[in-house]
Image (cartoon, grey):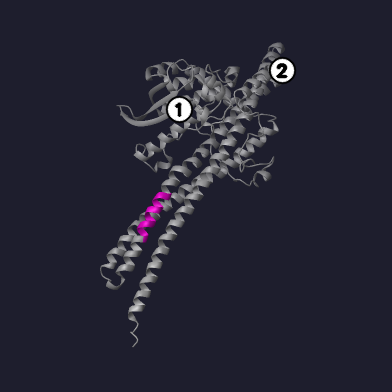
Amino acid sequence: MEGDRLASQARSSGLPAGGATGESPGVDAPLLGGSGSSALLQAEVLDLDEDEDDLEVFSKDASLMDMNSFSPMMPTSPLSMINQVKFEDEPDLKDLFITVDEPESHVTTIETFITYRIITKTSRGEFDSSEFEVRRRYQDFLWLKGKLEEAHPTLIIPPLPEKFIVKGMVERFNDDFIETRRKALQKFLNRIADHPTLTFNEDFKVFLTAQAWELSSHKKQGPGLLSRMGQTVRAVALSMRGVKSRPEEFMEMNNFIEIFSHKINLIDKISQRIYKEEREYSDEMREYGPIHILWSASEEDLVDTLKGVASCIDKCCKATEKRMSGLSEALLPVVHEYVLYSEMLMGVMKRRDQIQAELDSKVEALTYKKVDTDLLTEEIGKLEDKVECANNALKADWERWKHNMQNDIKSAFTDMAEENIHYYEQCLATWESFLASQTDLHMEETSEDKPESH
């Protein structure tokens, strides 16, 4: 059957066939296990979720997609073929390395925008060089994300950082914001490069290698505006109809996404608030130390004590800054990336439902014999293959995503725990040293005060 052949292609691309994924000890249980909402709420690893709308989901009419879009373009180099069946945590076989750096501001009469240099190094035979250097702006990344979603509607595309910072808390062209975005864009590209299917997408290759004018020309080769609008309207109409009988495994998947989305979003908000409060605490503490120095100038008998306190506060300030730096670079980006992933997952489920809804509408039309039955029967056969292929692609990518998510979350929180232990040990040692010095000083003073015995 055509569906079996396509499903086989999806499996040969390196996506696990569902179920066990060779996860390491400690993450072998799913994050939110169980088949019902009660079981989901009793998860042991993390109890995570969110309730926001999808982030820039590109709605496309699945009926116009090429059936072969669910399978990767076959590589020409043996190394690339091996890399297809490897997870992204096996760098020994990686053959595509991408760096995003050197942000550059551009000012025109119409707009101001930032471009980033993208350097790609590869040993793949399908590339006509081993190294490429191009410049891309955020809109180019958006275009790539849309093309990937169009070509692979039920694969989990890595999320892009938001176009604007939340609620204007940071200037759009602030150095910190630009650096945060640069890191996120680099992670976006490397996530794609490490994906066993997306890495061989032709638009991804064009994005990495084409000069600006070539990329612009390539973009114009896509469907026209009216065609895209027609696809979108049709897809929205299908999604509004809904699906009559979503398979149980996708119901469970959808429940997982809803709970995960809600919890991870709460963790993100609380983590950001904790970071903000710790920043305010650190700023206050930096003012706290010098006051003791000033005080010591007018308290001759407390000079050593007050200077000792000031020294301890200064050391604790430095330790706090280091811990906050680790928090902002290691934990916060990981949590927020999975907030965006949760929104992407909702979009994937909608696109899967759109494909099934189109099949359902054809089956319904055949039931009532509203049009030519032979033509409908042929269309239904093709749509059944498409639904089967879409479902298999999502199930395989879902297991891969959960494996990576569990590893990322576990690693981020383990690193945070180790950083906290180190921080509190440092502060504790600092203050214990101060107390010891005060005890020694007190003993010396007591000894000096004792009268000499004759």
- Element type at marker 2? helix
How far across and down, in percent of the image, does residue 287 sit? 33, 58
Q: Quadrant of the C terminus?
A: bottom left
Q: Quadrant of the N terminus?
A: top right
Q: Name the residue carrying label 2.
A: 366
Q: Is residue 57 visible?
A: no
Magenta residues (range): 312-323
> Magenta segment, principal secondary structure?
helix
Closer to us: 319 or 78 = 78
Dot in front, 1 or 2: 1
Horizontally, residue 274 falls left or right of residue 17, namely left
| Dot 2 amino acid type | Leu
Q: Say whether disc 1 or disc 2 marks the residue closer to the N-terminus.
A: 1
Query: Which disc is residue 317 wearing?
Result: none
Closer to us: 204 or 106 = 204
Which residue occupies 66% across, 18% down? Answer: 5
Which residue occupies 35% across, 78% down? Answer: 447
Q: CA distance from mark 1 to mark 2?
A: 50 Å
Q: How many marks?
A: 2
Q: Name the residue carrying label 1.
A: 97
Residue 4: name its quadrant.
Answer: top right
- Element type at marker 1? strand
- At label 2, counting other C-alpha atoms closer than 10 Å, the crowd grade (few under 14, some 14-19, many 20 or more) is some
How far across and down, in percent of the image, does residue 181 sit? 41, 35
Horizontally, residue 46 falls left or right of residue 305, namely right
